[in-house]
Amino acid sequence: MSMKSLNILRVLVVGSMMLCGSAHAFAATFDSIAVDDDAATSGGQAGYGVGEGSSADEAKREAMKQCRSSGNHSCEVAVTYQRCGAYASSKKNSGTGTGETEKAASAAAMDNCGISACRLVVADCVGKE
């Protein structure tokens, strides 16, 4: 095999390895947060579950399952996202947020909750273990 053929082969092998390794990064995945937050719950104390799926509906179903399996009975999906999402609450208000980072999603949830008594309940990013 000539040196030129060997170099072409190396490029092809490395290129295919890079494509295979990055396939997960391009897979469309969703996460959802389901919460059980009633009037008797203090700010930031809501029960919740986080679910992941290959579709928004699958992520919502998984979040509801996780919320219920944590002992919560009145779970509702609060937010579904493809990057990061968060939920904040007080005794009377709640808010959700999404963003490119957990910090951005958390800030949006706190802003959308609207009052200083709000506390962050949960923040999550797709792919986070």
Image (cartoon, rainbow, N blue to C red):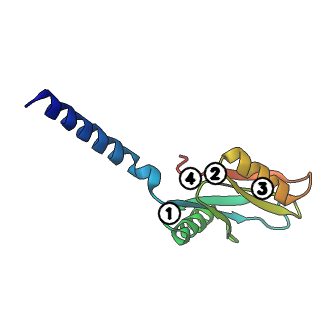
Q: Quadrant of residue 35?
A: bottom right
Residue assigned mark 1: 53
Image side of residue 37 versus residue 12, left or right: right
Asked whether disc 3 touches disc 4, contact meaning CB atoms under 8 Å apart, the reply is: no
Q: Residues within 10 Å of mark 4 (few under 14, many from 20)?
A: some
Residue 22, image x and y in percent? 40, 46
Q: Report the front residue among 66 and 8.
A: 8
Q: Residue 126 has which mark?
A: 4
Label 3 Cα crowd, 10 Å radius (few <14 / some 14-19 / many 20+): many
Report helix, strand or loop for mark 4: loop
Q: How many marks?
A: 4
Which type of secondary structure does the marked residue at label 2 adopt?
A: strand
The image position of residue 74, as x and y in percent, is 70, 71
Residue located beneath label 3 in the image? 109
Distance between mark 2 and mark 4 Cα atoms:
7 Å
Whichever of callouts 1 and 2 sits on the residue coming sooner in the sequence is 1
Residue at 54% of width from left, 72% of height from top? Answer: 57
Give the CA distance from mark 1 to mark 3. 22 Å
- On screen, 109 above or below 57? above
Image quadrant holding the N terminus, namely top left
The answer to which of 121 and 85 lies nearer the viewer is 85
Name the residue beneath numbered marker 2.
Answer: 124
Local secondary structure at mark 1: strand
- Pinpoint residue 94: horizontal percent, then vertical percent: 82, 62
Closer to the chain start, of discs 4 and 1, is 1
- The kind of secondary structure element at disc 3 is helix
Q: Earlier in the sequence, mark 3 or mark 2?
A: 3
Looking at the image, is 52 positioned above or below residue 12?
below
